[in-house]
Amino acid sequence: MNRLILHAKRLLAAWTDRPLRSGAVVGGRYRLDEPLGIGSYGLTYRATDLLSGRPAALKQAKPSKGEAARELLRREAAMLERLDHPAIPRALSLLEERGQLYLASELAPGETLEDLLFEHGRTFTETEALRLVRSLADIVGHVHDRGCVHLDVRIPNVMFNGEFEAHTSAAQVGFASGDSEAHTSAAQVGFASGEFEAHTSAAQVGFASGEFEAHTSAAQVGFASGERLSLIDFGLARRIGEPPLAAAPASEDDRRNAPAEPASDLLDLGHLLLFLLYSSYVPEPGAPDRGWEDELEPAFDTRRLLRRLLGSKGPPLGGVPELLTELDRMLAARRAVQVRDDRHR
Ligand SMILES: Nc1ncnc2c1ncn2[C@@H]1O[C@H](COP(=O)(O)OP(=O)(O)OP(=O)(O)O)[C@@H](O)[C@H]1O
C-alpha cells in the first residue's frame, strides 16, 4: 500500500514538474527555447530575453517542492546579487507569474566540464589541468572575497567555452596563451568578449523585482578572447559561516549541510583537479583500484598540492590566495622547463 502511495506521489510530482512548452513567454520577457535540466529544486530552461535579444537561463522553482524551492531560488538570486565577476552569470530578474517563481540570469556559453570530459572525451595534461584549476580558483576566490562559499564546485557546474576538438590541447583553446598573461587577472577567465557585449550591463536590462543593484558591466573589466570558463549554479551557495538552510531537509543532500567554509570549496577544487587528471588515465584492463597517487603518478608538487587540497597529508591550504600562489609557482616552474627544453631542441 505504501509503495502504491509513493508511486502515486511520484507520478503527481512528475506531472506537476513537467517543463513548460518551448515558445512560452514568461513575464512578458523571456521566451523559453528548450529545457536545460531538472535539478532537485528547479527546472532550468534556455531562454531568449526578448528585451535585449540575448540568450538567458531561466530557472523555475520546482512546483512540487512548494515554498522550499521558492525560498532556495530567492536565496540564489540574493547570492548572485552579492557577486560581480565576469565569469559568473549575472542575475537579470526574479519574477513571479501565475504562482510560479523564476530567476533569469545570463546564459553561460559553452558546455559543462562534465560533458566535455565524458561526452567529448577531452583529455587534460597535468599542466592544462593545473591551469584550468588556477582559472577556476580565481573565480572561487571572488566568491570568498564577497563573504560567500559556492559549495558545489563540480564539473557539471563549470562551463567551458572554446573552439575545441575532442583532443585539442588547452593551449589551442586559450588556456596557455602566454601563461603570464593567462593567469594575471580573474577578468581574463570570463566569457568571450562577444558574449559580453551581448550582455552589456545589468543596469541596462533592468531587474524586474527591483531587488538587485546594477552590476558593473562585464565589458568594462576586459577579456582576453579565448579564455572562457564560468562558474554556474549558486543554488547551494551560502554566506561564510551560515548554518545549513532550514528549507533543505538534512537527509536530502549532504552538500546542503556542508560547512559553509572556504575549505569546502578548496576540497571541491581538489576533487575537480583529480577529475581532470583522470581524463588522461587509461587503466590496465582488469587492474585493481590502486588509488589516485599510484594510478596518476602526478609530479611531486602536484601530488603535494592534491594531498593538501584533499586533506590527506600536509598542512591544509589557508584559502584561495595561498592556492593561487602555489599554482603560480608550479606553473612558473613548468614554464621554465618548457623554455629550457625549447632551447635545447
Ligand atoms: N546560467 C547558466 N548558463 C548556462 N547553463 C546553465 C545555467 N544555469 C544552469 N544551466 C544548465 O542547466 C542545467 C540545469 O541546471 P540547474 O542548476 O538548474 O540544475 P542541476 O545542476 O541539474 O541540479 P541541482 O540544482 O539539483 O544541482 C545544467 O545542465 C546547467 O548546465
Image: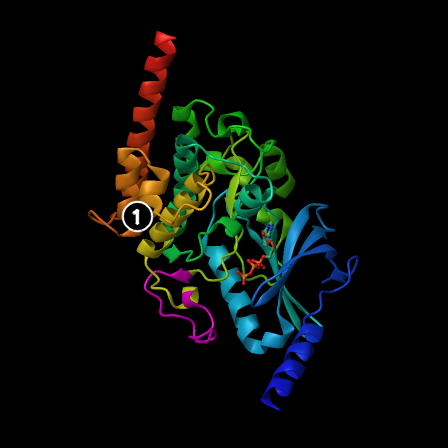
Residue at point 36%, 39% (across, down): 296
Quarter holding the N terminus is bottom right
- In terms of secondary structure, where does tag 1 sit? helix
Quarter holding the C terminus is top left
Location of residue 167 (image quadrant):
top right
Near-viewer residue (229 or 343): 343
Q: Amino acid at mark 1?
A: Leu
Quarter of the image where ligand 1 sits: bottom right
Residue 279, given in percent of the width and then of the height, sits at 47, 40
Q: Is residue 105 left or right of residue 182?
A: right
Q: How is the image coloured?
A: rainbow
Visible residue check, residue 255: yes
Residue ID for mark 1: 309
Residue at point 38%, 12% (across, down): 342
Q: Is residue 310 left or right of residue 161?
A: left
Residue at point 59%, 49% (across, down): 203
Residue 28, given in percent of the width and then of the height, sits at 75, 60
Q: Is residue 308 left or right of residue 345?
A: left
- Specify the farthest residue to the front: 286
Q: Is residue 240 magenta?
A: yes
Near-viewer residue (84 or 14): 14
Visible residue check, residue 208: no
- Image height check: is 150 above or below 276? below
Near-viewer residue (170 or 144): 170
- Specify the farthest residue to the right: 23
Near-viewer residue (111 or 81): 111
Q: Which residues are magenta?
A: 238-254
